[in-house]
Amino acid sequence: MKKRLISLALLSTLSASTIAADATFTATVNAISDAAIAQTTALHFGAMQPSVGAACTMSDAGVVSGACDAANANIAIGLITVSGLTANVPLNVTVTGVPGTNVTFEPTFDINGAAAASDANPEATAIAITTNSSGDNLLLDVYGVMTVTTALTPGDSYTSDYVVDVSFQ
């Protein structure tokens, strides 16, 4: 009888124990850093007529036409550098004009250095791009149309800002 009790006690001890275990671990990720945006060359339309409605158009080659002085020495296409990029990342790039006090600027832009870009209508929407396999800098050429909204004082300088936005898709 004693042997039976010991056997029964040993059997109940063995059946209560388990041969499994569990543990909790942590998964980690680092967020991709934001890009850095810097102006390499300031956009300048040169000189234009001071009357309301006068418009100066700059082409993608930096050539101006319309109500402006095409021979002005200050003419320069805007060059923007976007750096600090990671390879093969889908981004949206938008350039938006901000009305100035007496003039408005409607930007148009080109993107250089992306692996792929969709720029069917860069004036109205973001351009969807993918950075190249090396994560090289993007170079934006900014140009467009400057229009006088309130009569200008001859000889004075006027500005209209533009915003470059680079965001993750």
Image (cartoon, grey):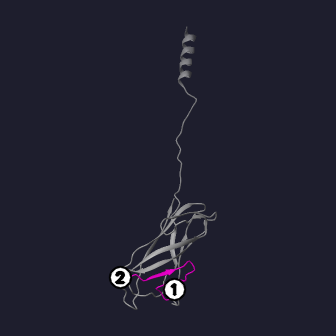
Helix, strand or loop at label 2? It is: loop
Q: Say if 5 sits above or below 27 in the image.
A: above
Principal secondary structure, stretch drawn in magenta: loop
Residue 125 on image: x %, y %: 48, 65
Q: Which one is closest to the eye, mark 2 or mark 1?
A: 2
- Secondary structure beneath dot 1 equals loop
- The vertical placement of 106 against 71, above or below, is above
What residue is disc 2 on?
150
Sequence order check, earlier mark of 2 and 1? 1
Amino acid at dot 1: Ile
Q: Which residue, given by chain and number where applicable, does mark 1 sit on?
A: 75
Magenta-colored stretch includes residue 55? yes
Instruction: Measure the alpha-carbon separation of dots 2 and 1.
Output: 22 Å
The quadrant holding residue 150 is bottom left
- At label 2, counting other C-alpha atoms closer than 10 Å, the crowd grade (few under 14, some 14-19, many 20 or more) is some
Q: Tell me the magenta residue range.
A: 52-69
Residue 83, x across and y down, in percent: 55, 70
- In the rendered structure, does residue 92 fall within the stretch colored magenta? no
Image side of residue 136 versus residue 57, left or right: right
Report the quarter where the N terminus lies: top right
Residue at 55% across, 65% down: 120
24 or 133: nearer the eye?
A: 133
- Dots 2 and 1: beta carbons under 8 Å? no
Could you tell me residue 49's position as x and y percent? 43, 88
